[in-house]
Structure formats: structure tokens, C-alpha cells
Image (cartoon, rainbow, N blue to C red):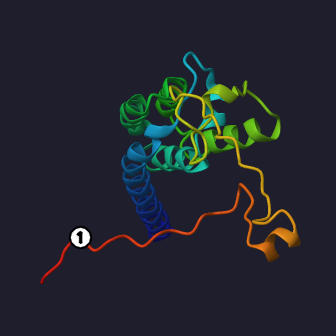
Amino acid sequence: MQDLLLQIFGTLAVIMLIAATIGLVGLLAMIRSMRDIQVPPNADFFTTLRYVPLGLVILIDLLDFGLDMLSAPIVWIVLDRMGLHALRNRAAIEGLLPFTGSIPVFTIAWIMTRLFNLGTPDLYYARPTSRTPPLDAEPHTAYPRRPHLPPYESDEQEQQGGRSTYAPTPRRPQPNIIDLE
């Protein structure tokens, strides 16, 4: 019986160590990629969850599973660096509660936020993509297009050699400036 308990606790300790390592390394790597997310100022918990990716909340839960109460200061510092203050406060409280590490609280909250449309979506603070201009950019004005006309207005003009006003003119050859002789 004692050997079985030692084996169970040893396996659980290895799993927790792996989860803590993946969570810590993942959160540190996620700091760089999260700089482009623009969360509205004074956003509540669910609104902030609408802007963060699922990977971040999974990494927070992995770190909380691996370190339990010791994860609170690490998560506090990392989420503070990311500017996610609403998540930081909840993660610290959840991290300080003993024996809640095995429950993926933030992953469940992220899924519930998506399913029940919790939080307030604000399109002004949407995540920038390759097609959206920066917030301080000037509005783009398009140049008017020239109407598409055939090079000759009629077949008679083509036969006579006349050109319409929109037909391209042939280019003259440029003189050779460098003469070696």
C-alpha cells in the first residue's frame, strides 16, 4: 500500500513539474507576442478575456496546477507586464486559494465568455491585423481610376491610323549617352 502511494505521489509530482515548466516557459514566451493586443482601459474580467488568446489562459492554468499557491507571484508579475490587470487580480486570488490548482478556472471562464457572450466587445480596441491601419493613421484616399476605353474609338479610325485620346503613345528610343569611340 505504501509503495502504491509513493508511486502515485511521485507520478503526480512529475506531472506537476512538467506542467509548471511548460506554463512558465510558455508565459515568458507569450509576453513578446502579447504586446500588440490593445485591451480597453478599465476593462472588466470578461471583457479582458475576450481579447486574450486561449493559449494564455491554458498556460496560466498549467502554471497554477504545477505550483498551486506559489504561482500567484509569478502570474502577478507576468500579467502585469502584459497589461492585463483584470486577469492579474483574479489570477492572484485564485492562485492563493489552496487546492484549486487542479481546476482550470481561467480556461472554463474563457470558454464561458465565448459561449454566453460575456463582457463588452468594443471594435475600436480590436486586435490589429495586417489589414487594419494603426489607430493614429490618416484615412486612406483612393485615386480616381481612368475610364477604360479601347485604344481606338472605332474600326474606321484603326484602319486610318488615327488614335483615340486614351491610346498609349509609342515611346521614342533614348539616345545612347555613353559613347566609347
**Residue 116 left/right relative to 67:** right
x and y, in percent, of residue 158 in the image: 79, 73
Above-or-below relation of 180 to 85: below
Q: Secondary structure at mark 1?
A: loop
Q: In which quadrant of the rendered view does residue 121 lie?
A: top right
Above-or-below relation of 144 to 137: below
Q: In which quadrant of the rendered view does residue 83 lie?
A: top left
Identify the residue under disc 1: 177
Residue in front for this viewpoint, 88 or 171: 171
Above-or-below relation of 19 to 46: below
> From this viewpoint, which residue is outermost toward the bottom?
181
Graded by Cα atoms within 10 Å as few (under 14), some (14 to 19) or many (20 or more), the crowding at tag 1 reads few
> From this viewpoint, which residue is outermost toward the left?
181
Which residue lies at the image location 44% right of the left edge and 50% below the top edge?
A: 66
x and y, in percent, of residue 80 in the image: 40, 28
**Residue 157 left/right relative to 180:** right
Residue in front for this viewpoint, 6 or 148: 148
